[in-house]
Amino acid sequence: MRKFIYFILAASLLAACKSDPHFTVKADIAGSDGDVFFLQKRTDDAIITIDSAISRKGAFKMRGSVDFPDLVQLISVNTYDRVYFYLENSDIKITGKLDSLADARISGSVTQDEYQSLMEADKPMSEKYNNLLTGYQIARQTNDTQKITDYQAEIEALEKEMITMQKDFVKNNPSSYVAPAVLRGLVYEMEGDELEAVIESLDQHVAEMPVVQELKTLATAMKAVSVGQKAPDFTMNDVNGNPVSLYSKIGSGILLIDFWAGWCAPCRQENPNLVRIYNAFNKKGFDIFGVSLDQSKDDWLRAIADDKLTWTHVSDLQYFNNSAARLYAVNAIPSNFLLDGSGTIIARNLRGNALYEKVNELLGQ
């Protein structure tokens, strides 16, 4: 009897082990043989290797488990080619070629299918956006002011369309594990209250994801610097090493706090627009307070000189650990806050023509 009971117990334990949630990644990568592959995920601080394998005539297998579906990369250590996909506890197959690994076909992951559908819907707009950016750069190089204005208007309209599509995806797919990643990319375009409301609409199993918990914390911080709130004061050194407080620049006019960096291409692209607005409205009461997320003082000063940014600039040269950026919940740049004469935030993240029109509305008469 004891042997029989032991047999039943052992069989039950074995069945339980086999039924534990896990993933199996089976790959067939033509052109690889003896190549080392890493399965990795990115965090804010590091790249974590989940598993590794060596291909044999193109084939290899990886196995493990994840708490939640997560966006990962399969990378060839030998060639640095890679493909991104959503890893979840299921049987996943990857079929492709080593010299075009990014185009590999992924099957067996429901979350990946959802992600792929979103990418396919976004593809025409992304291609159009890239073409518009190319045209805009050419117009900038030839100093064609009319085309620059036209391209800016088209780019801004398309950006709004892309944002709307992504917001609709999150709204219509509250049970999708892709939704939090999309939502994270939309934070720049949202106020804290809106972000909090979207998080509350997510299904419970999705809301338990670590990224959603991070977004909850961010939403709380964003609410403290939302439109209508008093801008928090801070003090930071200027280009000469002298401390300058935000509120020393606030007066009867309006002030733009501009978070930027010399290494940030979109920031440098926006700088000519800031110069245009500053020159047009500075004598009417418009000023800019530049906060740099640079790490090198030389690079920071060079960017200021090259872009002819003649307003006050401060930085602690701490990259995204910049104390003012943390205070204002800035996790992407360029980012800005428009303040009235009392230091109240009246607008956020206005760029291009939208910023010009807002300043003109306030000071144009």
Image (cartoon, rainbow, N blue to C red):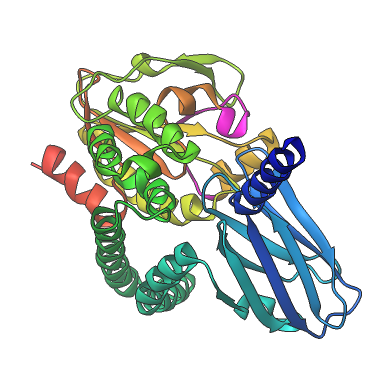
- Residue 175: image x %, image y %? 33, 52
Query: In which quadrant is the N terminus drawn?
Result: top right
Q: Does 238 appear in magenta?
A: no
Expressed as whole percent of the image width and height from the top left, the position of residue 303 reads 58, 45
Q: Position of residue 40 (x, y in %)?
A: 70, 54
Tell which residue pokes out farthest to the front in this image: 1
Figure quadrant of residue 218? top left
Which residue does the image show at 25% across and 47% down from the upper left? 355
Magenta stretch, residue numbers: 307-321
Horizontal placement of 251 versus 294: left or right? left
The answer to whether residue 158 shows anywhere in this view is: yes
User: Which residue is painted at 37% across and 72% down in the image?
Assistant: 122
Residue 176: percent from left, percent from top:
37, 55
Does residue 311 appear anywhere in the picture? no
In the displayed structure, does residue 302 sit left or right of residue 80?
A: left
Q: Residue furthest right?
A: 34
| Residue under the image location 28 percent in, 62 percent down | 156
Count every numbered label the image shows and give the total: 0
Identify the main secondary structure in magenta: loop
